[in-house]
Amino acid sequence: MSSVTSTSLALSRLLDDDASWRLLRADNAPVIAALLSEHLGGEPQRLPADELFEVLDHDLERLREAGFELRRNAQGYCAEWREAGFLVRRPSEEARGETYELSPGALQAIRYLEQLATPRQTATESRLASIAAQLGRLAVDTDPDATRRLAQLHAERDRIDQAIERIHAGELETLDPSRALERIRDILAQAEEIPADFARVRAEFEELNRSVRAGIVESDATQRAVLDDIFRGVDHIAESEAGRSFAGFSALVLDAELGAAFDEHMTQVLEREFADSLTPSQRRFLRRYVRVLKERSGEIQDVITTFARGLRRYVQSQDFQRDRVLQRLLREALGAGLAASARTKPYRVTGLELSLSTVSMSSAGALRLHDPAELDASAPVEVRETATADLAALRALARETEIDFDELTGHVNAVLGELDTCTVGEVLARHPASQGVASVVGLIALAAANGVVTDDTEPVRWQGRDGRARAATIPVHRFTGRVL
């Protein structure tokens, strides 16, 4: 097969599978790119579904007034774009609902269209100098000959020493403003490519998660190897090539010294006169660049952690065995159907009856999704030794939760042994309230059941649990006989 033929076949498959190419050849490609770039191409890069529908409906109405034929509403177009691979829908991590964000293919297509609309000059001195500097550094760092490496390093040191001498001599030369502007635009062009890469990195990890799970279900050899690794604590997501590559990038992004130096240098550059030629959005992008990288890096790290935990739970809960059984049954059914297709027509009446589910499907919102995390029993069961009950501790606990009527009855009867009748206040004067206001309430309850209540009043006093004295005026409750 010729290279032209193989390339044509590969591009034909790409034409059907690649979301970026699909967007570029869509009927309403200009409208799609403009809407998605406006609301999801910058900051924020993720919006709640309701919020996105609202702003898109507003823009669609204005586009219809401008002459564009747009028959659907925002929700309908978002469903179509998600099906086409332009949008990615995820459950919201902050509230109930869903969010939308651009897919890697849509990001790539939008960036390409933006370059067509505002082409950048790529053959610049700045870009050539950057390539030459990186190539020179690579040549030095990979040279196994110590003599050549030392010679190159000495030459670099001599150039630095000469530059220092010229500055001491008063020969301070700054970069021409036009060349400085060219360099900052080149830096901006390279910087704009990195945040878009995070979507592709996340898609790679999602595909890796699916492939590892498929490997567990598919082949016995792969299954045993992966299961052994997982039970030994090996993180297949983090240990993959993509995981190791991202770990290095994330460590560099989270380096405090590098971030502080970057912010300081960026502040200095943006204060220069030549930076006034940048647009406000470009200046804002550069100022927030490190923070955006840290936020995106943190999100990808959370994705890696979630996938790793989910994979470990998938193995520990033995769910993969159920999936293997289901896969085997499906293959057997497909094999039987293929064998029967040679002698049985698809529309032949079989005479079999299939009992369908009786669950009412009136509304998807009425369904409650199964959360496997609720059934996760991987945590060890704690065993506690029993101890002998302490009678004093039990009594203290009872006194904290209940009124000690036995104590109050004894106090009342003790006072009645000295007097013919007594009031609640007189009992408290001789026997202070040991349970605070609870003792007062208990005495009033006993007097109401075993005495009389008059229209007169009397003061009662007790000490609260905070140690402070308390007082109140209550109707006179008089005990006229012993309390049984």
Image (tube, rainbow, N blue to C red):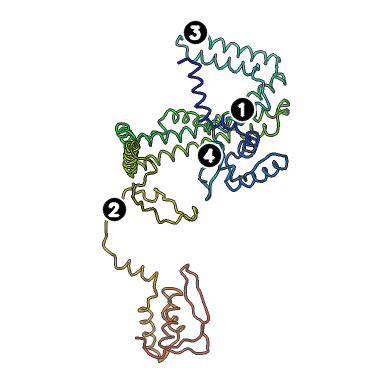
Tag 2 or tag 1, which sits nearer the N-term?
1
Circle 4 residue = 83
State which tag comes first along the sequence, 1 or 3.
1
Q: Is residue 405 left or right of residue 53?
A: left
Q: Where is the N terminus found, in terms of image quarters?
A: top left
* Residue annotated with mark 2: 383
1 and 3 marks in contact (CB < 8 Å): no
Distance (Cα) linking label 1 and label 2: 62 Å
Q: Amino acid at mark 3?
A: Arg
Is the residue marked by circle 2 packed among few (<14), some (14-19), or many (20+) residues within 10 Å?
few
Q: Nearer the viewer, mark 4 or mark 2?
A: 4
**x then y, percent, for residue 176:** 72, 18
Image location (x, y in percent) of residue 79: 55, 43
Tell me where residue 411 appears, x and y as whole percent.
Answer: 38, 82
**Up-down: is 53 above or below 18?**
below
Q: Name the front one of labels 1 and 3.
A: 1
Numbered mark located on residue 112 in the image: 1
Lateral position of residue 121 relative to residue 81, left or right:
right
The residue labelled by disc 3 is 148
Q: Position of residue 42 (x, y in %)?
A: 62, 36
